Image (cartoon, grey):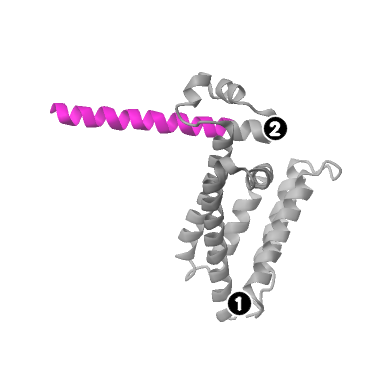
Amino acid sequence: MPKYDINIHKFHEKKKRFLAREQAIINSAIRLAKKQGIANITISLIAKHAGIGKGTIYKHFISKTEILMRILLDYENKIIASLQLSMGATDSDPFAPIQLYLKMRLADPRLDRLMQQLEDQLKYDIQVAKSMAQFYALRRSNIASINEAILLLIKKGLLQDAPSSHYYFSYLALVQGAVDLSLAGNFKLDTDDRESFLSFILEIGTTMGKTSS
């Protein structure tokens, strides 16, 4: 193998290891934040959980705040990528984007709650002001995709004719309410009850406003 090709191979392998380690840091931060709360996690705890040195984390992120911002952006990017794919499936299933959005938000209530908490904590942090602007741009894109799907359903006569914003805010209220209830200690939903409840909410969300056509 020519030396040039060997160097390229080594570069790609090094980059692959770097990205894998970065993802391990993010995953560890998510698990710790879900379990212990955002305020109680530190760079040292994340490093220990990820099985790497504290100094190694600073090769990827300059601060805990930057890690938290990355988590928030990754979550929103995952939603937008999935919505874009589902928009291409509307011919076979017009409700695919709505169902997918609700599924993603309800799949892991603790993760969704964490995202809400991160947004509340970071939206006024000047350290990540540019990143938050990027996050809200992604959010607007997601809302636009959902509204596009809603308008298509109305046009096809599959949803009752109402402003798309009414549907979107209804989905939002349904998801956030379901997340809050599934995690509320006073309701004491066990694992099976919680899964059944969230499946029921998903069914309600995808049939809300549906016509008999």
The amino acid sitting under disc 1 is: Leu
The answer to whether marks 2 and 1 mark residues whose Cβ atoms lie closer than 8 Å is: no
The amino acid sitting under disc 2 is: Ala
- Residue underneath mark 1: 158
Magenta region includes residue 32:
no
Q: Nearer the viewer, residue 144 or 78?
A: 144
Total number of numbered labels? 2
Q: Secondary structure at mark 1?
A: loop
Q: Position of residue 121 (x, y in %)?
A: 67, 43
Residue 160 quadrant: bottom right
When the figure is inspected, residue 23 is found, relative to residue 114, above or below; the finding is: above
Q: Is residue 194 visible?
A: yes
Q: Position of residue 87 (x, y in %)?
A: 48, 65
Q: Position of residue 79 (x, y in %)?
A: 54, 53
When the figure is inspected, residue 118 is found, relative to residue 46, above or below; the finding is: below
Q: Nearer the viewer, residue 7 or 43?
A: 43
Q: Which residues are magenta?
A: 1-28
Identify the residue shown where x is 61% and y is 23%: 45
